[in-house]
Image (spheres, coloured by chain):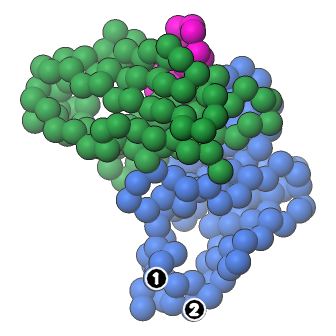
Chain colours: A green, B blue
Amino acid sequence: GAVVSQHPSWVICKSGTSVKIECRSLDFQATTMFWYRQFPKQSLMLMATSNEGSKATYEQGVEKDKFLINHASLTLSTLTVTSAHPEDSSFYICSARGPSWDNEQFFGPGTRLTVL
Amino acid sequence: EDKVVQSPLSLVVHEGDTVTLNCSYEVTNFRSLLWYKQEKKAPTFLFMLTSSGIEKKSGRLSSILDKKELFSILNITATQTGDSAIYLCAVEVSTGRRALTFGSGTRLQVQP
């Protein structure tokens, strides 16, 4: 199957700082990338959908000015958590899909963010 | 609003037991239902189901979809401790962005 990587795999930061998470499709062109968040003992919740070259579509309740998403190329999307607070501590997972209608989503390994 | 409900929420069994995990859904424009296994990291893909009544099988795992009754089951036979994980059910719709809506997951613990 296709490979999606995320970097970093974990990060600890101080409250008020910004953190950038990268999601890369390594062997295919990802026209669409999804960002999910998973709190402890909960399921994955979709935060936003990004299509290459256009603005991301955010789910209800997700602040677009706080979670900045950039999908500037067909192999890279970034999620920046701005002015992070302890309640933003979570497991962030991206997934990527190719351009064909039949393409499935492939998940990255996730990034664990801890905000002190 | 699309909804995916899994049951039970958690399950403890002994090695060798057979388990059945349930997933029901209410979505508009259903395209497929997917099962994932999640251990400590991101979910790993198990099955994608699009047609009713056709069982998908992989080793000791199997799954089937009922599009009339809007549910799917995931069976694991002869469970092993390595099957301990959270099993996630997700539904994909055929319109718009085609993101996945996940259920809350079933936490399975297999004891030796």
* Residue A56 is one of the magenta-drawn residues: yes
- Location of residue A14 with respect to A57 vertically, above or below: below
Q: Chain of mark 1?
A: B
Q: Chain of mark 2?
A: B
Residue B9 position in % (x across, y down): 49, 61
The quarter in which the C terminus of chain A is drawn is top left
Residue at the image position 12 percent from the left and 20 percent from the top: A16
Which mark, by number, is residue B81?
Answer: 1
Which mark, by number, is residue B16?
Answer: 2
Asked if one can make out residue B2 in the rendered structure from this viewpoint, the answer is: no
Asked whether A61 or A83 is in front, the reply is A83
User: Which amino acid, by three-letter code, is at mark 1?
Assistant: Thr
Which mark, by number, is residue A74?
Answer: none
* Residue B52 is one of the magenta-drawn residues: no
Residue numbers of the magenta segment: A47-61
Residue B48 position in % (x across, y down): 74, 52
- Location of residue B70 with respect to A19 vertically, above or below: below
Q: Earlier in the sequence, mark 2 or mark 1?
A: 2
- Location of residue A61 with respect to A43 vertically, above or below: above
Residue B26: quadrant of the picture? top right
Asked whether A3 or A60 is in front, the reply is A3
User: Which amino acid, by three-letter code, is at mark 2?
Assistant: Gly
